[in-house]
Image (cartoon, coloured by chain):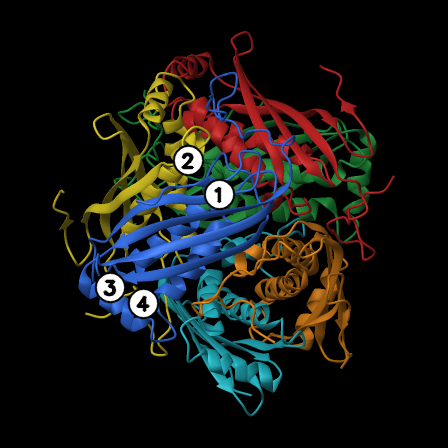
Chain colours: A red, B green, C blue, D yellow, E orange, F cyan
Amino acid sequence: MDLSHINDQGRARMVDVSDKEETNREAIAKGYVYMKRETLDRINEGTMKKGDVLSVSQVAGIMGAKSTASIIPMCHPIMLSGCDISFKLDFEYNRVEIISTVKNSGQTGVEMEALTAVVVAGLTIYDMCKAIDKEMIISDVMLIRKTGGKSGIFQREQI
Amino acid sequence: MDLSHINDQGRARMVDVSDKEETNREAIAKGYVYMKRETLDRINEGTMKKGDVLSVSQVAGIMGAKSTASIIPMCHPIMLSGCDISFKLDFEYNRVEIISTVKNSGQTGVEMEALTAVVVAGLTIYDMCKAIDKEMIISDVMLIRKTGGKSGIFQREQI
Amino acid sequence: MDLSHINDQGRARMVDVSDKEETNREAIAKGYVYMKRETLDRINEGTMKKGDVLSVSQVAGIMGAKSTASIIPMCHPIMLSGCDISFKLDFEYNRVEIISTVKNSGQTGVEMEALTAVVVAGLTIYDMCKAIDKEMIISDVMLIRKTGGKSGIFQREQI
Amino acid sequence: MDLSHINDQGRARMVDVSDKEETNREAIAKGYVYMKRETLDRINEGTMKKGDVLSVSQVAGIMGAKSTASIIPMCHPIMLSGCDISFKLDFEYNRVEIISTVKNSGQTGVEMEALTAVVVAGLTIYDMCKAIDKEMIISDVMLIRKTGGKSGIFQREQI
Amino acid sequence: MDLSHINDQGRARMVDVSDKEETNREAIAKGYVYMKRETLDRINEGTMKKGDVLSVSQVAGIMGAKSTASIIPMCHPIMLSGCDISFKLDFEYNRVEIISTVKNSGQTGVEMEALTAVVVAGLTIYDMCKAIDKEMIISDVMLIRKTGGKSGIFQREQI
Amino acid sequence: MDLSHINDQGRARMVDVSDKEETNREAIAKGYVYMKRETLDRINEGTMKKGDVLSVSQVAGIMGAKSTASIIPMCHPIMLSGCDISFKLDFEYNRVEIISTVKNSGQTGVEMEALTAVVVAGLTIYDMCKAIDKEMIISDVMLIRKTGGKSGIFQREQI
């Protein structure tokens, strides 16, 4: 199978999708931000209050999903029909789990939008907590599930 | 120590840095994209040619660094004075290592710009190879080193 | 009726519209910029000339309408099919009336685009006249009419 | 006094500020969103919870302030050194008061950034509550105070 | 025939295309960057290597095509379904020929996107070579061919 | 002399300018849009009226200058301190001459901003007149003069 992003001159192009069917599509991605226990505790306290770190992270992630095509060079512009992000504080591994769900109806899928939502949400958590923890790590950002389109359902085996 | 991003009403704000000194600052971040061996081989073949995946990834990462303040809500706008990205293909762990170096002269540092460069470069690798490998993982995105500013040098112990 | 922008975790999301019908939609919004009489006179003189304040304001308003989804966090990206702005100089109340009309064909309406066009046009008038009048006020920005979509016609009673 | 935005050909230009002094500057703006009592009640309930309307509005307002120069045609790009927004729920007049404070150090002031923060925050409140109240009005958006720069302090008399 | 961009008040508007048919459309544009022979030689050497000037120019041109509607005031937002750029080094006239091909399916065509791709690609060549040649000239940027839509095929006679 | 945009791995980078002096800089660029005589006549008639093609073109060119660093990959972000554009209708050659003047105070110059202003202004003229003339050509876009910075004055010999 070919890297379809490469043109005849061996350079990158935005793939022509004009013959692909327009279907309802969905992609789910996840990722983690690992941090010190104290940092996680601070975020947890915040979730009791109105202006918490995760609210800002969520707004950033959703706006990030919308700007995917202007950030990733060969991505097609896409009309998102929905975007949601959820968080889980995991005190066993001292990390925040970020899960994004993105939907569209169009000729290309929304994997990149779902992944971009996760990393932008993660970067925002880093930004808002870096005054107390510069060693946070954004990790295990991956596509979980993708439906719609010719290639059918992709479901990642959980690790 | 406080989460300085929170205002009196408990909501997020962009911290006032007008009293901080203007110094030369630098931040180095790194991250990895894990993939199938075949995918890494394909990228490796590409580096022999002009239009390779990593060239596009690098352009994306540098442009990503420049757009950090419009992606991350509480980030200050910053005049980057330089930005570079390097890649290492690692055939032992089947991954691409991405290292970004960002410089500026100003009242706030460029950690977020360096981290954003890494994740945008990583997302671009994913985008350009996803036709052959949807299971790639962006991982271990972290700040390596930061100099300049009142808080002095931050140097992460290598793992 | 619920605030549909809130997800299960109580945080904001971009509402899923993938089941909504694709129809022709239109929204009309208006607003005013109140100012000193001298400022209004100056704008009026300008409309006789080619480079007037209102021409710049109009370009800004139209471009603002197009960038609504990148400014308003939970707004869906929308393909505008048309956008127009008209002005009326009102010497009785010393104000400029701004009326925007925005059209699209899609799954969500263009109220936000019409309102954004009005406020960006208003801000631009402020910007271009602030050297002579810092006390201008942008006021009474409201949706006048909205057609298309399941909720049918909304027509505001005039005040 | 002249409209300095007009060039020799009678067209708009971005004024040359290269001879202006670089000083610390601050601008404060305010505005209101008028709404039904029920809508205000709903927002008020939300402020008890983490994902409230005002948190999203605040993030939007701060990001709006940062993008002022790309929204308002003749605005100079500015490095904001700080931005904050506060809200007051006013049950007497059934409105939300929005106050923004923006700081920078540079050759031009931040009035436009403060005003843009207010209107974008207001538009976001509209967007998130429009499912239950399409008749909200954004009103009385004005500059309250401005310090720094050659023209000195501007302080609006309260109305 | 009228300049359809002008509204009743004699000001610019974004033309209403909601009654136009949605068809597959394509536009091809070209342009040249003239330069010193030594500059062309340097670019030519680069094409042998991975990080050449033309690869960066191509990424820029494709991203430029995607941002056309935010750069050109009265342009409709458009969902590109494909974009490609090719280069030819012309040692007879000491110039680089840039040809862009843009496709979409929608109510308006992609001429502006194709032209924007060419000029952004050209500006990027200038930027990356200006350290050795400030006298480069971007010239002869024109639409070559356009298909789809009511107005039918436009084919420019070659010069 | 080297192409300074190339890093050790042979890929593109944003050059480090942190050791360059901060000086007042200015760049002047020009370009032409060639068109049918009838098209030029139509533009000329418009300049008598308020909403003319050239006013929109000028706003677009100035906004384009401000967005140069987000369009051209390796361009440094720059705080423009001024930007102006002038037009001359040339009935001998049936063309519009566009001249841009851009100023800043910083570590890098504004050649790219001046050139970007010209091409964006030219593209906007094309966009607004393409309904009556698809054969317009944007040509002879070049840097005329550049002052400030270590490399001193660049003055192009007129052709």
Q: Residue furthest right?
A: A1
Q: Residues within 10 Å of mark 2 (few under 14, many from 20)?
A: many
Disc 2 versus disc 1: distance between alpha carbons? Answer: 10 Å
Disc 4 versus disc 1: distance between alpha carbons? Answer: 36 Å
Q: Which of the chains bears the disc numbered 3? A: C
Label drawn at residue C146: 1
Q: Nearer the viewer, residue B86 or D116?
A: D116
Tell me the residue that label 4 is attached to: D5
Q: Position of residue E101 (x, y in %)?
A: 74, 60
Front position among marks 4 and 2: 2
User: Is residue D45 shown above or below C141?
Assistant: above
Disc 3 versus disc 4: distance between alpha carbons? Answer: 16 Å
Front position among marks 4 and 1: 1
Disc 4 versus disc 2: distance between alpha carbons? Answer: 36 Å
Tell me the residue that label 3 is attached to: C40
Q: Is residue E26 left or right of residue D48?
A: right
Disc 3 versus disc 1: distance between alpha carbons? Answer: 30 Å
Q: Nearer the viewer, residue A141 or C109?
A: C109
